[in-house]
Image (cartoon, rainbow, N blue to C red):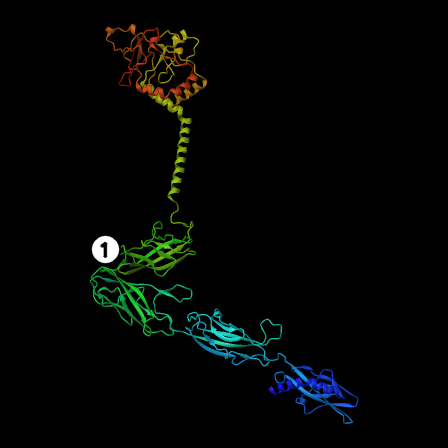
Amino acid sequence: MDVSHLLLTSVLFLLPFIAQVSAQQPGCSVSNENPSVEENNPPGYNVTTIDLEAGFTATVDPSSPDGSYFTIQGSQLQLVKSVDYETDTALLVTVACQNAAGQRDTLDIIVTIINLNDNIPVFKQTNLTVTVPEDRKVNATIVAREDLSASDADLDIIYYELNSTVQDTTNYFAIKGINNPEIYLQKALDYDKFNSTTLILYAMDRPVGSSEITHTVTATINIIIEQADTKPPWFLPCSFIDVDKSICISSPYSGRVNISEMSTEPLTLYPGPIYAKDPDYTINEKIVYSIVGGNADNVFSVDADTGNLTMNKIATSPDSYLLQVMATQVNNKQKYSVVSVEIKVINKSDHAPYFESSTYTGIVSVGVAPRSLVFQVEDPSSPLMIKAADDDFPDKFNPNIEYYIKNSTDFIATRDGLILTNVNLLSPETVIMEAVAKDTVSLQEASTIITVEIIFTADKITSDKLYTAQDMGILGGILAALLLITLVFLGLMIYKHYGKTVRFLINKKFSKDVPKSYENQAYNQDEHPDLSVKEQESSENGGITELQQPSFFLTSSKEEIDGLPKTSTASAVVFDLEEKEKEEEEKEEEEVKEDTKHEKEVKSILKTDRNEGDQGYKAVWFKTDVDPDAGEKVEVIKDNASDYDDDSDQDLQENEEEEDDKDDHHRGPGVSIDSENSSFPAAEVMINMSRTATENDVKV
C-alpha cells in the first residue's frame, strides 16, 4: 500500500511533463487523464474514453503497474474488477497507441479511487466483565481505553456513547470523552444499593445526528461490585434514618436487678440481648464486646463473644447503672460502635401481677369512631375495664402496671384498663385478643383473653357522650319555660271557670264570723217606695229578710251616705242589681245550697214578745224596751258599727278592694249604716244559736 502511494505521488508529479510529451505525439488522447472511480464498482465500469487518430489502435500496456485492472473495449477504458479504497487509493494504467506503419504513442492515465463508508466499526471485545471494589475511589478508571476502542476500515473517526441497563446506575459510570471510550467511576459506590450493573458502549462512524449513513456497533460491559469493609458494627435492633439505609441508629438497652440480690444468669434486657453485627454482611467480620464506662464498683461484666451481661457482685445502692458497651471488629479496631445499657436497681417483687378474671367480654357497635369505648356485655351502659392485681401491694393495686393489646390493632387499652377502638369498625364480627398487664418496674407480665362482639345497632353511637353539659342546661331551661307557661295557662283556666265559686265560698266562710245586716221590709216599702228590693221569704209573724250583700262592709263615700234617708237604724236599703248579676248570684246560691240546708229557717226578730222556749228563736229589741231589772240576758251593741271589724277583716277588705270596685259599677252605690249619722237610737240584739256553743253578735 505504501509503494502504491509513493508511485502515485511520483506519477502525479511527472504527469504534466508526460502530458506535454504526449501532446506532441500523434496517435491517441483522452479528455480526462485523471478520472475518479468510487470503490466497490462493478466489473466493466467505464473509466474514460480514448480518442484515436486514424489508423491507430489502443491497447493496455502490460507493463503498467495496475494494467491488470483495465481493458479497452473500442474506445472505452474499463475496469475488469471491483476496486477497494481500503486496498488501493489510486490506479496507474498506460495505454499504447500504434498504427500499421509502426508509429507508436503511449498515454498514462491515473485513476483515483473514491472512498465510500462501506465498513462498520469493530471492537476488540464486544462483551467483557469487570469487578469493581465498593470502596473504589471516585474518578478512578474502571475500563481502559485500549480495551474499548473500536476500529473502522474506512478510517473514519469513531464516536462513543455510554448507557446503563440497570435503573439508577447510569450516573455512577461515564466515559472520558466522545472520542475516548475509557470508563471511569463518577460517583461513590454503595453495595447496599446495588451490587452489579450492565453498561452498553456505542461506537459510531458518524457523529450523533448526522444525515449521512452511520454504522453503529455496541460493546457490553458487566460491572460486578465487590462489597468492602466500610461500615462499623451495628447494635440491633436499630432504625434507619435515611432512604439509602446507610445509617442505622441503635436503641439503648435496659434491664432490672433486685437490690442486695445476686443473679447468676445473664440479665434479661429490653428490647433484647446485647447483639451487634457487621453491616458489611458479605464480609461479616467477627465482633467482640466490652464495657467501657458506667460500671461503678465493677458490678457487671459482659461476655466478649456473646455480649451476655452478668453480675460480678450484688448491687447495694438503689441508684441506676448506665453502662457503655462497645462492639469492635476483630480485624480493625477502628471500626466500632458504643451503646448505652441502663440497669435499674429495684426492690424485689415477690408476686407477679395477675388478672382477677381469666376472660373479659365486651360489645361495640359497627361504625363507631376510633377511640370509642367498648362496653360490657352484661351491662351495656358500663365501659369494659380490665384490671390486674398485684399481691406485693396491700390493696393489690400496682400503680406501675400498664396495659396493652398484644395481637390486635383494632383495639387499644388505656393505662387505666379501658378498652377503646383503634379503627373505624366497618362490619360485624367477633374479635378475640390477648391483653397484657406489664409492671414497668419489675417487667413482670400477666395476660388475659378479651372477646369483643362487633354488632349492628338501630341507633349507632357516634360518641361516648350523647349530650354535653351545655346541651342538658339548654334542655332544662326549655322545660322550665314550658312548665311556667303551663302553670300560667292552668291558673287562667281555673280562674275563668271556678273564680266566682271560690270567691263565693270565701265570702260565705267570712260571713259566718261577721254580723249580718237585716232590713225591715215593711219599713222599706213605706219609706222608700221608689226603690226595688230583692224578693225574699217571710214568716207569718212579720218576716225578716237577709240582705244579699258582701260578707264584709264596703266603705261608702260621704256623698252616698248623705243621699240616703235617715229614718231607722234597724233597716238597710238594698238597690236593684243588674239582671246579669242576679243570674250569677242565683247560680252561686244553687251550688252551695247543700251547704246551707242544715241551717234552720230564720224567724223574724221584730217581735214584741219573747219566746225563750224556742232555742232557734232570734229577736231584736230596741234599747228603750229592755228592762234592766228583769234579769234578762241582753247585750248592748255600741253605736259605732265599725268596732266589730278586726284586723283580718281590714286586710281582706284591702285585698278585695279592687274586685269590689269593679262590682260597684254593676250594683250601684253602696250603703253604709253609721250610728253617728242616724237619727234612730241603737238597738239591743240577742241571738241564741241552738246549733252552736257560742253567741254571735249581729250589728243592725
Based on the displayed image, in which of its 4 quarters is residue 684 positioned? Answer: top left
In the rendered structure, the answer to whether residue 375 lies left or right of residue 223 reads left
- Spot the residue most to the right: 54
Residue toward you, 330 or 334: 334
Based on the displayed image, in which of its 4 quarters is residue 586 positioned? Answer: top left
Compared to residue 389, the image places residue 617 above or below, namely above
Based on the displayed image, in which of its 4 quarters is residue 526 positioned? Answer: top left
Which residue: 27% across, 54% down? 399
Residue under label 1, please give it.
Answer: 393
In the rendered structure, the answer to whether residue 92 lies left or right of residue 75 reads left
- Residue 685 placement (x, y as % from top left): 30, 11
Count the marks: how many?
A: 1
Q: For the residue marked with disc 1, what is the amino acid?
A: Phe
- Residue 512 placement (x, y as % from top left): 32, 19
Compared to residue 11, the image places residue 514 above or below, namely above
Q: Residue 596: tell me if it is visible.
A: no
- The N terminus sits in image quarter: bottom right
Compared to residue 401, the image places residue 488 above or below, namely above
- The C terminus sits in image quarter: top left
In the rendered structure, the answer to whether residue 649 lies left or right of residue 631 reads right
Is disc 1 placed on a helix, strand or loop? loop
